[in-house]
Amino acid sequence: MISFYFGRLMEIFPFFLKGLWMTSKIGFISLVTCTLIGFILGIFRSSDSTILKRMVGVYVAFVRGTPFVVQIFIVFFILPEWGVQLEAFSAALLAMAIMGSAFICEIVAGGINSIPKGQWEAATSAGLNRIQQLRLVIIPQAMKVILPPLVGQYVLLIKDTSVVSVIGIMELTRVGWVTVVRIPEGLMVFTLVGFLYFIISYPLILLSNYLEKKMAV
Amino acid sequence: MIEFKNVNKWFDKLHVLNDINLKIPKGEVLVICGPSGSGKSTLIRCINRLEKIQQGQIIVNDTPVHDKSTNLTKLRAEIGFVFQQFHLYPHMTVLQNVMLAPVNVKKIAKTKAEKIALEKLEQVGLTEKSGAYPAQLSGGQQQRVAIARGLVMSPEIMLFDEPTSALDPEMIGEVLDVMVNLVSEGMTMCVVTHEMGFAKKVADRVLFMDEGKIVETGTPGEFFDNPQTDRASEFISKILTH
Ligand SMILES: Nc1ncnc2c1ncn2[C@@H]1O[C@H](COP(=O)(O)OP(=O)(O)OP(=O)(O)O)[C@@H](O)[C@H]1O
Ligand SMILES: [Mg+2]
């Protein structure tokens, strides 16, 4: 019986590959947007401006203090009430960007704050403007602190893409659900799903471990 | 060249600079001394606006430093600042440290900036270290790189905040030698230091601070041999015995 289902599973394997493709697509786009927005917010969060700091602080607290599923529902069901129409794919990307950027913001701000004040002062005295100070002096040093947890966060983001299945996106997890209805071998189906996630996240885990070791010296 | 007019500054309730009036003419070498916490660092950090002031005016070369409209980049390019703890950029080589400001602030072409940077490294005796990273240098060498990094912008003013206090005794001399050479080039210098030998040798004037006030000023001879106030004489006897 099991081998029969296994055969069926292999028949619909292309369906899983489509799911994998969707997961990778959402994952990749999210990593890029979350990183960009996260760095900008992190720079605001570590700035001297109390207003900026507070505003970003509230944003981060909200994101950290609410479940991701709820955030997706807010983006998908509540925004249309206000006249913002989003298809599921865009809503998923937007929700991922909001959630991921908040976590990356904290990592980036932590890295920037770890740089001694004297580095800012030396760069300031040299006549560099704020953006040059960050770009040439502060961020290159902060990357040592930022990179290992950043890549770790990427792994979490990839896994969190599974949550967007709740608004009907045919990514890996939803492919799993849909399949179980037809092939009642939950263990087999979700082992395959898990394995496919693992294929994407494992290289990132290795990279994170490698960076952690390399940055420690 | 540098003028303080009724400058007052507070850190919360602490009155760190109390009605400072001071004129530093072009080419003067001013040594600032005083007990810990008296406001020496704060005083010179206001000159390139590393610190803000709440009252009064500081004028550098006709530019009011603390005006909103002041072009800080231009102002800071004219003022070199050397810190007690060097603050070299650890992720850059010595040469990159020195070239950073000319390339990015003055927009000088890389090849030309490199040439100027190497000249300044030669001036502080560190040409052969241009490819090293700060962590590979001794404290004295790091501080000399920091001086070269300031000089590379061809500033008219150099500010030093206890440049030798973080150094092992055997390295103090090499840094002071570089500074003495600057004096002979006619650089305007404000030096916070307790190095009496340096002050006596090259300072035009010594300024003694206590609790945010300028308590006494005089030539090094007058100040060290014949201080006018009790606080100054007490301070001098302390640095002599230590
Ligand atoms: N950023 C700051 N915030 C609050 N207080 C400060 C700050 N910087 C300095 N102070 C205080 O202002 C006073 C003057 O400090 P300053 O560093 O100018 O003294 P100093 O004469 O340079 O002392 P030292 O010889 O120890 O370097 C000190 O009491 C110090 O604690
Ligand atoms: Mg000081």
Image (cartoon, rainbow, N blue to C red):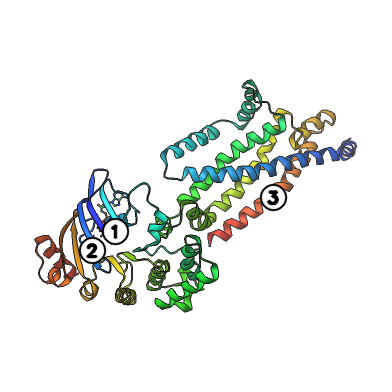
What residue would you read off at disc 2? B32
Quadrant into which the N terminus of chain B falls:
bottom left
Closest to the camera, between mark 3 and mark 2, is 2
**Mark 2 residue element:** strand
Quadrant into which the C terminus of chain B falls:
bottom left
Tell me the residue at 29%/67% (across/down): B189
User: Can you give x and y, in whole percent of width and height, for residue A105 in the image?
Assistant: 53, 43
The type of residue carrying mark 1 is: Ile
- Chain under label 2? B
User: Can you give x and y, in whole percent of width and height, for residue B50 in the image?
Assistant: 35, 54
Report which quarter residue A22 is drawn in: top right
What residue would you read off at disc 3? A202
User: How far is disc 1 from disc 2 in space, using C-alphas?
Assistant: 9 Å
Report crowding for label 3: few under 14, some 14 to 19, many 20 or more residues within 10 A (C-alpha).
Answer: few
User: Can you give x and y, in whole percent of width and height, for residue A43 in the image?
Assistant: 50, 46
On whether disc 1 and disc 2 are found on a single subunit, the reply is yes
**Mark 1 residue element:** helix
Task: Judge left or right: residue B74 versus residue B4.
Answer: right
- Label 2 CB less than 8 angstroms from ligand 1: no
User: Can you give x and y, in whole percent of width and height, for residue B73 in the image?
Assistant: 42, 56
The type of residue carrying mark 2 is: Ile
User: How far is disc 3 from disc 1 in space, using C-alphas?
Assistant: 54 Å
